[in-house]
Amino acid sequence: MTRPLFYFCVALILLPFGVKLGVPTWVPLAKHLERQFSQPSIPRYTVETIHGEVWTLRAPDQSLRQVTLAGIMPIDSRWQAQANGVIAMLLQSSHQQVDLTITSVIGGGKARAIAQLPNGTSIQQVLVADGLAKLDKTQLRLLPDKVRNALQQAQTSAQQQHKNIWG
């Protein structure tokens, strides 16, 4: 049974009891259902291709946009295949959908961006935490504090655990 149908059935069963007891059962249930189904529609980008560090994405308006991942250096060729595998698994789980936050425009129609899966997972943070990418200190100042701190913590952890490039 799907969740909406389940909640509707529960409401129909419990509503008479709530009315008899003077308990407003319908109001909390209605608020829960409203939260469940009124999630704002966030326009997402679809990853079309990845060539090295350049990602080509289809924007919500169907235009193509090229970005590189902000805050990290280009991935070393020794680790590119493993990084590509991690990225492929992440994108498969989100049906190629990502949320972008543009941090800077680098010319040639390209931009640097923070890429997150719809569930909030930062692609940069996963790569850094797995020791597959290093932070680019020149770009860190352009990132929001929260993102910068998370990336720095991920790199420190990867270094301490001697993961991949840090091994």
Image (cartoon, rainbow, N blue to C red):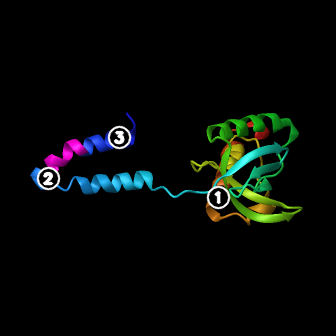
Q: Which residue is mark 1?
A: 147
Q: Report the front residue among 135 and 31.
A: 31
Q: Is residue 155 visible?
A: no
* Amino acid bearing label 1: Val
Horizontal side of 10 relative to 54 (left or right) equals left
Q: Secondary structure at mark 3?
A: helix
Disc marking residue 59: none
Q: Who's the residue at 36% across and 51% down the image?
A: 33
The picture places residue 40, in percent across and down from the top left corner, at 51, 58
Q: Nearer the viewer, mark 2 or mark 1?
A: 2
Instruction: Tell me which numbered mark, 2 or 3, is placed earlier along the sequence.
Output: 3
Q: Is residue 158 visible?
A: yes
* Amino acid bearing label 2: Val
Q: Who's the residue at 68% across and 43% down the image?
A: 96
Q: Residues within 10 Å of mark 2 (few under 14, many from 20)?
A: few
Q: Residues within 10 Å of mark 3 (few under 14, many from 20)?
A: few
The picture places residue 27, in percent across and down from the top left corner, at 26, 57
Q: Which residue is mark 3?
A: 5
Instruction: Tell me which numbered mark, 2 or 1, is placed earlier along the sequence.
Output: 2
Give the quarter of the image for residue 3.
Answer: top left
Task: Quarter of the image for the C terminus: give it.
Answer: top right
Q: Report the front residue among 89 and 58.
A: 58
Q: Look at the image and say whether residue 133 sits in the magenta stretch.
A: no
Q: Report the front residue among 11 and 142.
A: 11
The picture places residue 38, in percent across and down from the top left corner, at 45, 56
Q: Which residue is mark 2?
A: 19
Write down the region rendered in magenta. Answer: 12-18
* Amino acid bearing label 3: Leu
Horizontal side of 8 relative to 20 (left or right) equals right
| Residue at mark 1 to residue at mark 3: CA–CA distance | 39 Å
